[in-house]
Image: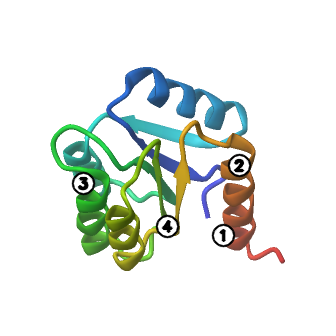
Amino acid sequence: MREKLKILAVDDDQPMLRTICDILRIKGYECLPVDSGEKAVQAVHLEEFDCVLMDIKMAGIDGVTTLMLIKAVTPDTPVVLMSANARPEQIAAAKRYGAVTILTKPIDFPQVLSFLTGLRKEESGEE
């Protein structure tokens, strides 16, 4: 097990991506920022992540399509999607393809950190 959980953050909004990674790093996580679904898929082919935190609405391939592609490569990696205005059909598709949850933007960082704390305990075998 790694000392720090490794998070892949995916968002085409650069300030949001920077904020997500800054907060995660301050809280003790390793964070790799990528700004497109295409780069996210490339990243999971090259590295192993403990979690993917990804926007739904992005230029190029959207978060739901990226979710499907990521799950094809690494089916056990938890993927958390986020959106300011996800459509009901996107939410249904995301759940169908294995998203852990869909968070609304602006992001509730205490909620994200609570989820990651649970994930860290799960990884370390704590109860």
- Give the colouring mode of the picture: rainbow
- Secondary element under disc 2, as helix, strand or loop, is helix
Kind of residue at disc 2: Leu
**Alpha carbon distance from label 4 to label 3:** 14 Å
- Which residue appears farthest toward the top when viewing the image? 15
The amino acid pointed to by label 4 is Pro
Q: How many marks?
A: 4
- For label 3, count other residues whose C-alpha is less than 10 Å away and answer few (under 14), some (14-19) or many (20+): some
Q: Position of residue 48 (x, y in %)?
A: 41, 59
Q: Position of residue 41 (x, y in %)?
A: 24, 54
Location of residue 25 with respect to 78 vertically, above or below = above
From the image, tell me which residue sits under label 3.
41
Q: CA distance from mark 1 to mark 3?
A: 23 Å
Label 3 is placed on what type of residue?
A: Val
- The percent position of residue 19, horizontal first and vertical second, equals 55, 26
Residue nearest the viewer, comparing 81 with 25: 81
Q: Secondary structure at mark 4?
A: loop
The residue indicated by pointer 2 is 113
Q: Is residue 53 left or right of residue 63?
A: right
Dot 1 or dot 2, earlier in sequence: 2
Quadrant hosting residue 57: top left
2 vs 3, front mark: 2
User: Which residue is pictured at 63% across the width and 37% down the height?
Assistant: 24
Q: Are marks 1 and 4 in contact (CB under 8 Å)?
A: no
Q: Residue at x 26, y 70 (%)?
A: 73
Element at badge 1?
A: helix
Disc 2 + disc 4, Cβ < 8 Å = no
Where does label 4 land, which residue? 78
